[in-house]
């Protein structure tokens, strides 16, 4: 058993692509070796990555494949040997399988006598297979953007290949890729170690030798070093904490081979700028971590993660350089912040006529008009349903919501759209309701974002997204497959999150209807159902992926209604609770019974049997069908009142009590009775049972565990 | 604290020129037509086409009218100086050689934090793009390092490395001044008196900001744009695909056509700074400029094809 190490040295790989490539390389090498029967499933795989290298190490690699012996059957014996002399047919077969004619034997099968040979296929060495197969695997690694570099463009890869290491224990495997041949030499940190080659004699030395060349090859080790260094350096400021930012930690981990951290300071006067702007400049533009003081307020410090190690004098130089850059960026931001405020938001609305929203939908001025109509209609509707809101504030916020798209600060920091508008609204004294609504209009954008905290913000968010979705669908611009250029899925997820978490009494169909213009209404037949289907998918996604409900619960619940988001969630929750406490299997049995009911009814329909959902009590003759009907009749009003009160878990509990009666019914009563009257009535009975509970969940969708 | 021992602006330029000349680059002079970036000089845009190896370095004053700030912003200029290096094909150790050029500017990497961060470059109106990095030194982007993949809509073979140094930024960093205008451009060899960037260029920034934002005559600019465009198109129309007319085609002055195309590009930038280009017009104009640049690139590449064939024969 050997240890295999492979490293590919590259010019700096984009940080965002490293983690996937590291995983993919490890998977590809392992599955190739598995397919070649050179390792077992249990083989331990370790992977490494820095900006300049990807590596994988496996232990338990066989030196060579086992020989394989197999019997090969050839042509019929009688055409192969005539008078015990081999014919050309026998000679051809022997040549093909690589044995002498004398080694051919007779094989008797049920179909007759055939020529047969025992062939031994010698296993190939691991080195030979690796050298042959690895280049193909490397070439298949996915890169979000790649390049060519050699004349004639023989390959495309993320960046030029600079070296490779391929070792089976201490033997070099001469893998060729990207114009290089693998050896046993790697390179250390560009600056701290320089150009001197680092020889790796055996795979076991890899991590330690790189460490002494100022490279931490293991990603999680590097991440931990960064976190510890951030903690340690932050402690030099009394009571301070660095702002946790996982994506930023990942980025700097993939930008460094030998990380260290330096604390910088900026002039406290910049703290007059909003935190949002300061943090965006630090994080998005400089990859610096923000620091909070002991009161949780932004402190005039930042943390830069370096890809080097320096003494105190060097640290002073680097700190000074980073502070200089940040100061210039803050100056720019302050210039824009002051400059923008010379033009109030209300005056900017006019400028929106020159900003295109979408070429067929016109400018953001038009978009604002659309949003205003919808926001007004939503305000009327929820007010009628007893929701308190500041309607003038909502309309002002909606009118000004897009104005910040013309602000210099937003052009500079596009990720702050909405936020900047909200901040300007506050400094203009437009009131907290207006400012908050504008500020929060694009949230939630990511899964961990909160929804807008105010009703006005929620309604603006709903109106903006719903109008966009309905208008885009009307133009035939709905998302398809992986293509969603207008981020409509994210918009729909936002609508669902807001409806789920705000408690606003609004149904998806109401939002869609109010967002549909009279002209679009003519087309509503097709777009309407497409929008509803789209939201059905998003709600299904929300129930499963965000809320974590199982596939069949989501399906059962949505089959009974996907229009009221909060209600669908309540039903999914109750159904999940009832199912997990369904120790005596009542729910599973009810679900089985509902499946049976659906099957019987379908077959009946196919045979042209007539039935409805009104059972005639007098026509019930068997005791079991009378019992079922009696119990059903007493459960129905209880379930109905529980349903109206949205006490779904109790409703499901009541429905489950029908189980013994249902079981007995199917045991003893023949639904498809010879007598037409009885048959029709029994079909109507089970149809009524199914129909009465169908507004809570389609039980036939439940998969028994 | 300004660093008085750092290189002056012009020494920086000397050192870079000396460094790259010693590594086989032809030193060119700045192109004498307005460009927005060093890439647009024909020394890059056209030379990268075709198979012939070529190494060139030059400083290129780059005009971006909309970036003007009347000399009031310490970090932004209407016209900044790019130092451009084209290595076609790039040597194997191009990154390491680039790092040596930093030493030539007085940067000791052991005292600084260096990162190559992904930054891909694209000039849609030139049908050009490449992948590469912004080279970050202590958090400051000092160079754009690009592996040029396509130009004028044509795939390059061999590809080339393009290094673009932002000279003002680097000088301000090395001299440790907070305003570009405080950069020491030159020092009197006798008196040691410093001549600053502001003394050399401030007036130009102020006057061109005034012209670009306030006085440039929009209707005349549109007219100029049309005239240059028409003339460029007329030249390109001479480029015949007909093999029989090949001798004629090889006489077409594509270099002159490219100059006309650069004129169009600069006029568009002026119109943009004047706020005279609506959003809808914008896409159309960029498309028109692209048609010209791509037409020039194709015509130029066709001529090179002939030359290459001639060389081989």
Image (cartoon, coloured by chain):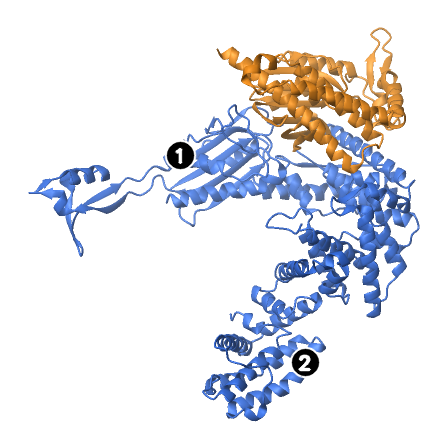
Chain colours: A blue, B orange
Q: Is residue A217 depicted above or below A604 in this figure?
A: above
Q: Position of residue B97 (x, y in %)?
A: 62, 20
Count of numbered tags:
2
Mark 1 nearby-residue class (10 Å; few <14, some 14–19, many ≥20): some
Q: Is residue A659 depicted above or below A542 in this figure?
A: below
Horizontal side of A647 relative to A45 (left or right) equals right
Q: Secondary structure at mark 1?
A: helix
The residue at the far top in this view is B190
Residue at the spot of label 2: A640
Q: CA distance from mark 2 to mark 1?
A: 70 Å
State the residue at coordinates (54%, 76%): A594
- The label on residue A504 is none
The reply to whether callout 2 and callout 1 are in contact (CB within 8 Å) is: no
Quadrant of image for the N terminus of chain A: top left
The image quarter containing residue A417 is top right
Which chain contains the residue that carries disc 2? Answer: A
Q: Earlier in the sequence, mark 2 or mark 1?
A: 1
Q: Position of residue A292 (x, y in %)?
A: 79, 46
Q: Position of residue A609 (x, y in %)?
A: 51, 80
The image quarter containing residue A167 is top left
State the residue at coordinates (40%, 34%): A132
Q: Is residue B281 depicted above or below B21 in this figure?
A: below
Residue at the spot of label 1: A132
Horizontal side of A444 relative to A408 (left or right) equals left
Q: Is residue B220 depicted above or below A247 in this figure?
A: above
Pick the residue in front: B155 or A200.
Answer: B155
């Amino acid at each position: 058993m050997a240890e295999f190490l492979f490293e590919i040295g590259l010019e700096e790989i984009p940080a965002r692509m490293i983690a996937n490539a590291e995983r993919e390389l490890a998977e590809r090498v392992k599955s190739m070796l598995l397919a070649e029967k050179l390792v077992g499933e249990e083989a331990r795989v370790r992977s490494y990555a820095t900006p300049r290298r990807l590596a994988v190490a496996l232990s338990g690699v066989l030196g060579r494949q086992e020989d394989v012996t197999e019997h090969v059957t050839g042509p019929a014996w009688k055409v192969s040997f005539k008078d015990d002399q081999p014919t050309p047919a026998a000679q051809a077969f022997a040549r093909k399988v690589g044995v002498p004619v004398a080694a051919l034997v007779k094989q008797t099968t049920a179909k007759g006598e055939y020529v047969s040979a025992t062939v031994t296929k010698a296993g190939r060495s691991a080195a030979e297979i690796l050298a042959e197969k690895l280049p193909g695997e490397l070439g298949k690694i996915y890169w979000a953007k790649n390049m060519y570099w050699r004349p004639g463009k023989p390959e495309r890869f993320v960046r030029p290949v600079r070296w490779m290491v391929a070792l089976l224990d201490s033997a070099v495997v001469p893998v060729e890729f990207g114009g290089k041949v693998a050896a046993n030499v790697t390179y250390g940190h560009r600056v701290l170690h320089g150009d001197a080659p680092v020889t790796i004699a055996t795979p076991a030395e890899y991590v330690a030798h790189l460490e002494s060349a100022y490279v931490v090859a293991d990603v999680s080790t590097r991440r931990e070093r960064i976190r510890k260094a951030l903690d340690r350096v932050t402690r030099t400021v009394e009571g301070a904490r660095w702002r946790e930012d996982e994506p930023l930690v990942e980025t700097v981990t993939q930008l460094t081979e030998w990380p260290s951290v330096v604390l910088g300071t900026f002039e406290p006067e910049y703290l007059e700028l909003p935190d949002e702007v300061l943090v965006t400049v630090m994080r998005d533009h400089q990859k610096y971590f923000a620091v909070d003081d002991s009161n949780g307020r932004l402190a005039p410090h930042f943390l830069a993660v370096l890809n080097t190690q320096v003494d105190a004098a060097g640290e002073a130089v680097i700190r000074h350089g980073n502070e200089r850059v940040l100061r210039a960026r803050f100056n720019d931001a302050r210039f824009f912040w002051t400059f923008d405020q010379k033009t109030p938001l209300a005056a900017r609305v006019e400028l929106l006529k020159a900003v295109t929203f979408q070429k067929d939908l016109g400018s953001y001025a038009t978009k604002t008009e659309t949003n205003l109509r919808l926001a007004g209609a939503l305000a009327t509707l929820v007010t009628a349903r007893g929701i308190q809101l500041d309607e003038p504030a909502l309309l002002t916020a909606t009118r000004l919501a897009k104005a910040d798209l013309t602000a210099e600060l937003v052009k500079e920091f596009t990720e702050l759209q909405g936020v900047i508008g909200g901040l300007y609204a506050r400094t203009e004294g437009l009131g907290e309701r207006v400012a908050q609504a504008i500020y929060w209009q694009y949230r939630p954008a990511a899964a961990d974002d909160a929804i807008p905290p105010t009703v006005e913000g929620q309604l603006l968010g709903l109106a903006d997204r719903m109008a966009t979705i309905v208008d885009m669908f009307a133009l035939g611009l709905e998302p398809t497959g992986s293509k969603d250029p207008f981020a409509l899925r994210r918009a729909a997820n936002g609508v669902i999150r807001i409806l789920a978490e705000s408690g606003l009494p609004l149904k998806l169909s109401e939002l869609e209807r109010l967002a549909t213009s009279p002209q679009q209404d003519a087309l509503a037949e097709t777009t309407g159902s497409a929008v509803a289907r789209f939201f059905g998918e998003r709600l299904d996604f929300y129930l499963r992926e965000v809320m974590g409900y199982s596939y069949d619960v989501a399906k059962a619940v949505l089959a009974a209604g996907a229009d009221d988001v909060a209600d669908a969630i309540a039903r999914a929750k109750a159904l999940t609770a009832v199912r997990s406490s369904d120790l005596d299997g009542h729910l599973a049995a009810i679900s089985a019974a509902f499946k049976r009911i659906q099957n019987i009814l379908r077959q009946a329909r196919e045979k042209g049997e007539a039935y409805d959902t009104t059972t005639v009590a007098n026509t019930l003759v068997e005791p079991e069908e009378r019992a079922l009907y009696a119990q059903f009749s007493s459960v129905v009003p209880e379930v109905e009142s529980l349903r109206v009160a949205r006490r779904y878990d109790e409703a499901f509990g009541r429905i489950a009590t029908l189980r013994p009666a249902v079981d007995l019914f199917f045991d003893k009563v023949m639904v498809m009775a010879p007598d037409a009257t009885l048959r029709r009535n029994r079909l109507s009975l089970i149809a009524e049972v199914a129909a009465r509970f169908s507004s809570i969940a389609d039980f036939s969708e439940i998969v028994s565990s | 604290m300004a660093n008085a021992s750092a290189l002056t602006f012009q020494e920086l330029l000397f050192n870079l020129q000396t460094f790259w000349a010693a590594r086989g680059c032809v030193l060119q002079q700045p192109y004498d037509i307005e460009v927005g970036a060093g890439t647009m000089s024909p020394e890059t845009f056209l030379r990268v086409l075709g198979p012939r190896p070529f190494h060139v370095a030059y400083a290129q004053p780059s005009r971006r009218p909309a970036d003007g700030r009347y000399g009031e912003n310490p970090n932004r200029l209407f016209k900044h100086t790019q130092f451009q290096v084209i290595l076609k094909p790039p040597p194997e150790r191009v990154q390491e050689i680039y790092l040596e050029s930093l030493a030539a500017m007085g940067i000791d990497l052991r005292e600084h934090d260096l990162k190559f961060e992904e930054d891909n470059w694209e000039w849609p109106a030139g049908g050009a793009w490449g992948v590469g990095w912004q080279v970050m030194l202590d958090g400051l982007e000092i160079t754009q390092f690009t592996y040029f993949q396509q130009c004028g809509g044509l795939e390059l073979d061999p590809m080339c490395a393009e290094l673009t140094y932002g000279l003002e930024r680097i000088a301000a960093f090395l001299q440790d001044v907070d305003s570009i205008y405080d950069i020491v451009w030159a020092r009197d060899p006798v008196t040691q008196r410093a001549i600053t960037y502001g003394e050399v260029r401030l007036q130009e920034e102020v006057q061109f900001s005034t012209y670009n934002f306030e006085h440039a005559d929009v209707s005349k600019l549109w007219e100029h744009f049309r005239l240059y465009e028409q003339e460029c198109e007329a030249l390109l129309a001479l480029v015949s695909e007909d093999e029989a007319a090949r001798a004629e085609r090889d006489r077409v002055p594509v270099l002159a056509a490219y100059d006309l195309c650069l004129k169009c590009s600069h006029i568009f930038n002026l119109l943009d700074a004047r706020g005279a280009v609506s959003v809808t017009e914008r896409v159309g104009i960029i498309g028109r400029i692209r048609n010209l640049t791509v037409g020039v690139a194709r015509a130029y590449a066709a001529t090179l094809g002939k030359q290459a064939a001639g060389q081989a024969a």
